[in-house]
Image (spheres, grey):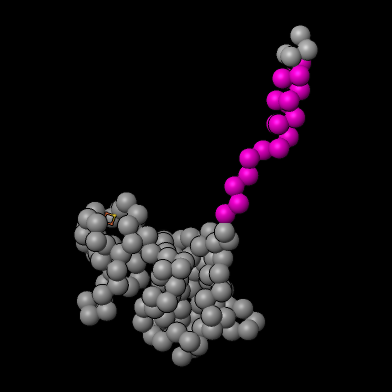
């Protein structure tokens, strides 16, 4: 009886200390917006798995994860497209599917401009719908 009650008390006590997984923040400072030229930047590809893309209208961040099965596409500047090495999906600079089995566009991450002029990217908040992804908080308009 004492072993049963002791075991029950221990199990009840353990219930108050749930397992917690501490993951790194999905938010990072991508540096000064001014440091990005028009085009696709791979500066944060290895460290954050994100491309920073600047156009003549503004800037946005795209998650470098293929929407088919999750491989990392590569940017081909001469072809103006992202190409996935796994099953051949192609995406244009905006992230739209132009070839292959990928079922939906690439995801864009939330971006904001810090008071210092730095670009803050938050990969925890994503959008891929045309219309929504082209507006804040997934796009920052810049007057070039
Ligand atoms: S994972 Fe990219 S095409 Fe299959």
**Viewer-side residue, 102 vs 64:** 64
Q: How many marks?
A: 0
At x 76% / y 15%, what residue is drawn?
5
Q: Quadrant of ligand 1?
A: bottom left
x then y, percent, for residue 131: 43, 66
x then y, percent, for residue 92: 29, 70
At x 73% / y 34%, what residue is drawn?
16
At x 24% / y 56%, what residue is drawn?
86
Residue 119 inside the magenta-drawn segment: no
x then y, percent, for residue 71: 32, 57
**Viewer-side residue, 1 vs 72:** 1
Q: Is residue 141 visible?
A: yes
**Viewer-side residue, 79 vs 21:** 21
Snapshot quadrant of residue 81: bottom left
**Viewer-side residue, 43 vs 84:** 43
At x 41% / y 70%, what residue is drawn?
45
Residue 18 inside the magenta-drawn segment: yes
- The reply, left or right, for residue 90 in relation to residue 126 is left
> Magenta stretch?
5-23
Snapshot quadrant of residue 80: bottom left
């Amino acid at each position: 009886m004492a072993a049963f009650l002791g075991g029950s008390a221990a199990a009840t006590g353990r219930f108050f200390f749930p397992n917690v997984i501490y993951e790194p923040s999905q938010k990072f400072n991508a540096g000064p917006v001014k440091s990005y030229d028009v085009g696709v930047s791979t500066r944060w590809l290895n460290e954050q798995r994100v491309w920073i893309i600047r156009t003549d209208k503004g800037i946005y961040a795209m998650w470098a994860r293929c929407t088919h099965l999750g491989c990392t596409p590569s940017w081909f500047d001469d072809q103006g497209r992202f190409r996935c090495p796994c099953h051949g999906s192609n995406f244009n600079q905006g992230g739209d599917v132009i070839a292959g089995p990928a079922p939906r566009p690439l995801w864009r991450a939330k971006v904001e401009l810090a008071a210092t002029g730095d670009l803050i990217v938050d990969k925890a908040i994503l959008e891929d719908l045309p219309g929504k992804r082209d507006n804040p908080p997934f796009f920052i308009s810049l007057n070039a």
